[in-house]
Amino acid sequence: MIAFTVRRLLASIPVLFVSTLLVFLIVASSVDPLAPLRARNPPIPQTTIRAEAVRLGLNHSLPQRYWDWLTGLVLHGNWGTSVSSGYDIGQRLISSFFVTFRLVILAILLSLILAIAVGVLTAVRQYSRLDYAATAIGFLFLSLPTFVFAILLKSWAIEFNQTVRPNGPPIIATLFEASPNPPTSFLGKIGDSAGHLLLPTIVLALVSYASWSRFQRASMLEVLNSDYIRLARAKGLSRSRVLLRHALRNALIPLSTQVALDTAGLLGGAVITETIFEWHGMGYMFIQAIDNYDLYPLLAWLVLASTLVIVFNLIADLLYAVLDPRIRLA
Amino acid sequence: MPEKNNDDAPVLLPTLGASLDQFVRSGGMPQREFTVKARTQREIVFRRFLKHRAAVTSLIVFLLVVLFAFVGPLLWNQSFNFMSNDIEVPPSGTHPFGTDSNGYDLFADVMHGTARTLEIALSVSIASTVIGTVYGAVSGYFRGWVDTVMMRIADLILTIPAIVVAIIVSDKLSASISSAWYFLAFILSALFWPVCARIVRAQVLSLREKEFVEAARALGAKDTRIIFRHIVPNCLGSIIVVLTLTVANTVLVETALSFLGFGVRPPDTSLGTLVSNGQTAIQDGFPWLFYFPALFIILIVLTINFIGDGLRDAFDPQQTRVRA
Amino acid sequence: MSEYSRLSTESEVLLAVDNLTVDFPTADGVVKAVRGVSYNLRAGEVLGIVGESGSGKSVSSMAVMGLLPKSAQIRGSISFRGEELLGRTEKEFMQLRGSKIAMIFQDPMTSLNPVYKIGFQLAEAVLAHHDIGREAARKRALELLEIVGIPFPERRIDQYPHEFSGGMRQRVVIAIAMANNPDVIIADEPTTALDVTVQAQVLEALRSAQRETGAAMVLITHDLGVVAGQADRVLVMYAGKPVEIGGVDEIYYEPRMPYTLGLLGSLPRLDADRAERLTPIQGSPPSLLSLPPGCPFVPRCPLAKPTCDEQEPELVPTGEPGHYAACHFSASLIGKRADEVFAVTAADAALPASYGAEIEGVTGQVTAIPEQPKAEQSE
């Protein structure tokens, strides 16, 4: 298994290389980070513009710039220079990652627990009213765009805050990942965090829940109809044991790979949720880089996002091998 | 007890030779076995789909929405970017969906936005399905290293979140090339085709082992003919289902992109842009600016999802599915 | 005591099925899977249930175990050791399953849970009904593996099902069934999914299981060869109803129902002393959704007369003890061979009479070829 992991990681390096190169070429060739400066009125002196160009390395050729960036990163840990001065890309990357990470992890946990519970219940009580209701709700959630749901939740929260505590600070925070002046006590901090986490977590959990619960239901039904479950019942095992020890254990295998893959997507793609709730996570960093024509933070973001995708794809495969003894890693 | 469908009643369709055979063998007794009227596969699928109440209702609703979007503007008296004098007026007779801060009639805006969203969704799904089918069929048919390489590329594209790539590419390139909607559709097609490719490939992998492929080859059929005249038609069920699901997905992604400002740009409008314009509308006291476009997005995606579910069941009924 | 039992009343009746009926409501109508099955199973005896797919043999056994889906409508009586099983709660069934009545299923490749070790699955069967420690359960598991003939049990016990061949997996399933010394073992087509060469091993394992536990066995199969070697009594089922029941010798040598005769005639036999033609039964079993009145075998029966269409024959005694047949004309089958009643398939009928002589030559036996009776031609 270790050999497999190492081989996969090594094979991923060219992928990283190619994707960063591609993005670099696309963005650097079509974007002029100095455009806002040039367009300013009253005009900025040429010397200042040229100085900026040098600072950003724009006087070199594209391949040269890419090479400089690559060697700078690999050999010196230097992420490059941003358009905005004083922007430490490396540090920003890490802090953004952790902000997004805690949101996504919580959302995934919530979503997973709900999806497994509902998936199992609806499979066991197939065609019951519960099953139909859960399916209908699942369909609704699948059809609800994240931004619509996020906006709805925000407005309800605002109303809720108004009615419950009209003149004080909001109970359910609608913006940012933490209050500007957070309480100092430990409990207070937790409470503040929770208040801010509530809405975005629900929004993120929603979409995953919708697809995972249907997936789990289908997987569970397939397992429940299998011969070995029939044999387990014929052995005289209790229903709960058959369900949990035998059925669920098998039904979770496909779901676990799906979760690993979706997590990668969520980490990179929670852009909308972060934008609406104005969280300063990876999504925000990404959008900001785009808006400011800021090449190097964008590249840094890309390296991290791609690495996450690669790592989680690897986890998905490893998980499958661990859970299913029939699978032997190539 | 389910109602007896008249067409399923036993129908005696003896052919002369068979009936004579049976007659003699049964000692002169009348035929005991019942035969059922033969149906083409198309009929069977169609009938199964019709049994799916939610899917049929959704199909009707969806067609109404399409009419609303494309025929509506021809009949409605206002155009979508016309600044009238009614600013932020709630829904009324002249403005069934109300107006926004610029005086634009939301009814006309929603019509146009829906049309734009649907145009993008339909063109993306058709393009990506065609590309994906060809790609997946070729990859699955030839196997070996060709398949491995092709699938690696497809997987690569699949694992990157569509929104991210779309934002990067569309924002940077569209400014210089074109901000027309078909450019956005082009980018999205490039992102969605691997989904179809994967599914078609899986089907082709199993179908290529079947005897009819061997028979065709023995008769001297060339590979391309085998792939496209024999194998692909047998995947039609999956392909159609993927097509519908891609429509739904594209609507969600495109509206999200437009919401963020990276998709359809002003002066053109899409449902996502409308929602973006109305995102604070609820608090500001003009809830219609948010609810109407949002409702239409949900409606489109929901109906497509139900239709897709009905189609999936019609092509391949399984015990495990809940009839929605 | 039901009349269908043997004359000898020494061993007690363990399982008494009386007029069991199972209906499945489906979207297309009600499927009458089982239409009145009755049999008694005595301690130590092997009852073979024979029939085509769809004859209802598996469904009736699943009913005994209480493993049918909730939608199934079960009527009649199933009693184990005198106590009625139908209508019992799931909890009561759980106590019986695996400990008093055990079942072996058809496909060994999918009968075992792929993610757990063999030892675990064996021990689980024991631990479900006995409160012994894990060590004791593991010992018992090793014992069981030895009884069914798995080589190197100490190594095998920690392996996963996918590391076993089909025949060995089925033997593990047999081991699981006998783990708690049940009174009744129901084997549902235990050899159908296996190679002929492996079948012998599995049947041997079944015999060991029966020997060790002293259990009575219900052996369900469509393979008459399997039944001949193992069963004491045979129940032949067709279209959800039993059509003949009797001792294995009587059924094989003196069948009194055309279907049984036809089944026997379609079996190739190494000990056939002439070049007899096989007599397959034309046609296929009827749909259980829309059964016409009268005997369900009529479309395929060469003896069918108008009475057969009107009245479905009941299981009536044939004159020999313990042998019952459901046919209006069972008496006319006395002394008949299969090829005297059923038609040979048309293509072969034109072969010359000397065909048989060549075959005799190969075996080295010089036997005079008696006159071949003209086989009945089919139109």
Image (cartoon, coloured by chain):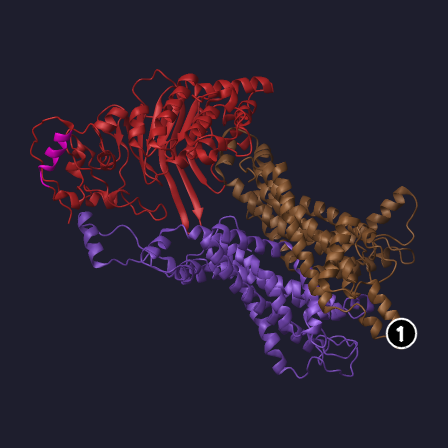
Chain colours: A brown, B purple, C red
For the residue pair B137 and C199, the one nearer the viewer reads as B137
Q: Is residue B311 left or right of residue B112?
A: left
Judging from the image, what secondary structure is the residue with disc 1 in? loop
Q: Main secondary structure of the magenta part?
A: helix
Q: Is residue C178 magenta?
A: no
**Residue A160 vertical placement versus A228 (above, below):** below
Classify the position of the N terminus of chain C by image quarter.
top left
Q: Quadrant of residue C248?
A: top left
For the record, the magenta segment spans C352-362
Amino acid type indicated by mark 1: Pro
For the point 26% across and 29% down, the residue is C324
**Residue A102 vertical placement versus B3 (above, below):** above
Give x and y (percent) for residue A226. Answer: 49, 39
Residue position marked by numbered label 1 in the rendering: A45
For the point 24% across and 41% down, the residue is C281
Q: Is residue C356 magenta?
A: yes
Counting other residues with Cα less than 10 Å from the Cα at mark 1, is it few (<14), some (14-19), or many (20 or more)? few
